[in-house]
Image: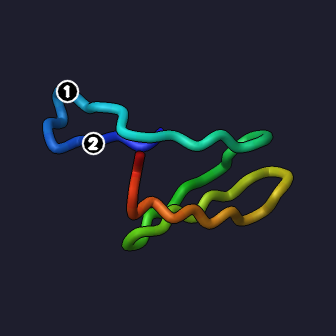
Amino acid sequence: MILDIANPSSPVSVGKIMTKNLISGVKISGNYAYVANSILGLVIIDISNPS
């Protein structure tokens, strides 16, 4: 799930992506989310357009 946290007391969901299996970690760098997936390994997701 991608959240807009411009107002931390009221985060807003702006997008999401479904992955199979468990996620063990996420690192954001620029327009990319690097997601550690238990089965698929490293999944790189372009988050430049969250919707």
Q: In this view, does 46 lie to the left or right of 14?
A: right
Q: Which of the 4 image quarters holds residue 30?
A: bottom left
Q: Mark 2 points at which residue?
A: 4
Q: In this view, does 20 lie to the left or right of 4?
A: right
Q: Which of the 4 image quarters holds residue 22?
A: top right
Q: In this view, does 12 lie to the left or right of 21?
A: left
The amino acid type, in three-letter code, at marker 2 is: Asp
Q: In this view, does 51 lie to the left or right of 35?
A: left
Q: Point out residue 31 in the picture as x, y percentages from the top left corner.
A: 41, 69
Residue depicted at 82% across the width and 57% down the height: 40
Residue depicted at 40% across the width and 51% down the height: 50
Q: Extreme bottom residue here?
A: 30
Q: Point out residue 12 in the picture as x, y percentages from the top left corner.
A: 28, 31
The amino acid type, in three-letter code, at marker 1 is: Ser
Circle 2: element type: strand
Total number of numbered labels? 2
Q: Point out residue 38 in the picture as x, y percentages from the top left corner.
A: 80, 51
Q: Is residue 48 above or below residue 21?
A: below
Residue depicted at 17% across the width and 28% down the height: 9
In space, the residues marked 2 and 1 are separated at their CA atoms by 9 Å
Q: Mark 1 points at which residue?
A: 10
Circle 1: element type: loop
- How crowded is the residue under tag 2: few (<14 C-alpha within 10 Å), some, or many (20+)? few
Q: Point out residue 21 in the picture as x, y percentages from the top left corner.
A: 79, 40
Residue depicted at 36% across the width and 39% down the height: 14
